[in-house]
Amino acid sequence: MANQKPEIDKTEETLVEFPCDFLIKVMGETHDDFAATMVKIIQAHAPSFDASKVDMRASSGGRFISLSCNVYVTSKMQLDSIYRALSEHPQVKYVV
């Protein structure tokens, strides 16, 4: 048994080296509190997230809004939690 290799948890494999700054893009229909709501969701998982690191753009027709958020993340689990929380919000159409 001493020669057995430890099992590798495939769920933790990633090409990203943590900690790092990570760009998350969120898109949804234009709504007055969309940006503020997305910032609160991110801050719930990354309390030090600075809202000034959000770049906001409206679609050409003004129906949609996209946010580019530069978030400092310390682990894959934290990043996955942020993506999951954003994706589950009813105002969000797309997260990359």
Image (cartoon, helix red, strand yellow):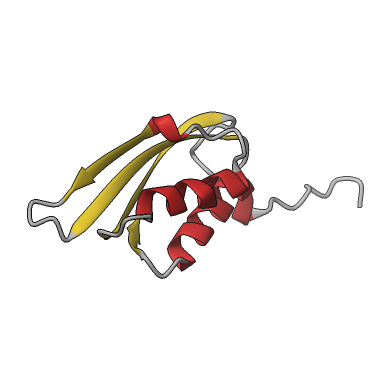
Q: Quadrant of residue 54?
A: top left
Left or right of 14? Residue 75 is right
**Point 39% across, 39% down: residue:** 69
Q: Quadrant of residue 11?
A: bottom right
Question: Do we see residue 11 in this rendering?
Answer: yes
User: Observer-nearest residue: 63 or 22?
Assistant: 63
Which residue is nearer to you in this view: 81 or 47?
A: 47
Please tell me whether residue 39 is drawn above or below residue 71 in the rendered image.
below
Q: Position of residue 92 (x, y in %)?
A: 36, 63
Q: Residue at x 24, y 52 (%)?
A: 65
For image coordinates 52% across by 60% down, the residue present is 84
Q: As drawn, which residue projects farthest toward the bottom?
A: 90
Residue 76 visible (yes or no): no
**Nearer to the camera, 86 or 3:** 86
Residue 59 percent coordinates (x, y): 14, 52
Left-right relation of 92 to 51: left
Q: Nearer the viewer, residue 72 or 90?
A: 90
Percent x, y for residue 68? 33, 41
